[in-house]
Amino acid sequence: NGIRCKNVISTTGIILARILTPKDFGIYSMVQLLSFFVFMFWNLGLNAAMIQRKEVTDEHSHTAFTMCLAMGVFCFFVAWFIAPFLAIFFKEPSVTLLARLIGLTFIIYSLDRVPSAFLNRNLHFKRIGFINLLNPFVYAATAIPLALFGFGPLSFVIGLIVGAAAMTISRIIMGFELFHWRPRFIFVKKAAKDLLGFGIFVTFTDVVNFFLSNTQKIIVGRFFGAVELGYFTRATNLSYLPIKNVQTNVGNILLPAFSNIQDNTEKIRSWFRKFNFFTYALVTPPLLFFSFFPNEVIMGLFLKKGLARFSLTFLI
């Protein structure tokens, strides 16, 4: 189901690429940079910390919910304040409204971090897969009609908000039914310390990954404009698609699986080696095919030959 979820997102992106202009994609990419940056600090790694812990008490779950919601509201106001400056930096006035709207997702996602962690901890991957499918399907059902009616980059943002709301509501309902969990505004200092002890390292990793992955986008958007950034973003997304389809989904399974054997170092190393071999065995063939036939792939999917030179660069 994780692969299906990624395929729905990819198909939606291809359809939107045929409807919208490269500038629309570029403007949305500018907004995404703010969203990705704030998201690094929004969760504080609490979701991963709850999955990793051997034992999670009510104090841990209620403290995590309280902290996540507080950070979600805080990050919404941060995005609201930063949005005009982001528009000035990229010289695109429309970025202000889009960035402020996308800030709503920080509050929406903060509501389901605890039930999401419970689902992962208990290895309910079939249920997780079906719930996760709601997001791209609702996103597609919202964004594509809006794009056809001329909403431009606003189509992405509204689709993202509606999709996030649908998935969050589903996770909360599942948490109520399976784990009898009810949100309570409780903060226990010791529980927070337990969770942040692991979560802070996850946040640090996210910060490093953000700058490694997005520095080029910041430079392209600032000095070359929204059109070039649109081409650049579509090319990088397409180039990274094979490995993201595999690595992201398998990685989500490994975290709760490793938490159950975290004292067995040798077994963890063995699983990790198998994971790497499995990943490269699956992604190498499509990457090689795309390297040899970039123009055919791009023209077949997007009818935009100019993307091929960007995509081939990232594959190399």
Image (cartoon, grey):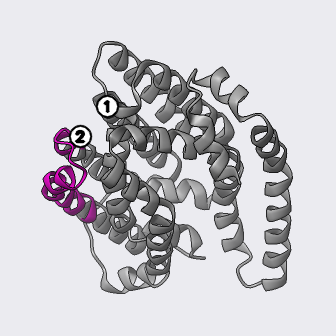
Disc marking residue 98: 2
Query: What residue does disc 1 label?
Result: 153
Magenta residues (range): 71-98
Q: Secondary structure at mark 2?
A: helix
Left or right of 3, for residue 96: left
Q: Residue at x 48, y 73 (%)?
A: 208
Task: Tell me which numbered mark, 2 or 1, is placed earlier along the sequence.
Answer: 2
Q: Secondary structure at mark 1?
A: loop
| 79 magenta-colored | yes
In x, y percent, where is residue 84?
13, 52
Residue 41 sits in which quadrant? bottom left
Q: Nearer the viewer, residue 76 or 85?
A: 85
Query: Would residue 124 be visible to someone looking at this image?
Result: no
Q: Nearer the viewer, residue 303 or 33?
A: 303
Determine whether 36 is above or below 233 in the image: below
Q: Nearer the viewer, residue 169 or 2?
A: 2
User: How much space separates mark 2 and mark 1, taking CA atoms?
Assistant: 8 Å
In x, y percent, where is residue 239?
64, 45
Is the residue marked by circle 2 packed among few (<14), some (14-19), or many (20+) residues within 10 Å?
many
Mark 1 residue type: Pro
Count the marks.
2
Q: Nearer the viewer, residue 114 or 107?
A: 107
Mark 2 residue type: Leu
Q: Residue at x 41, y 45 (%)?
A: 172
Give yes or no for contact between labels 2 and 1 (Cβ–Cβ under 8 Å).
yes
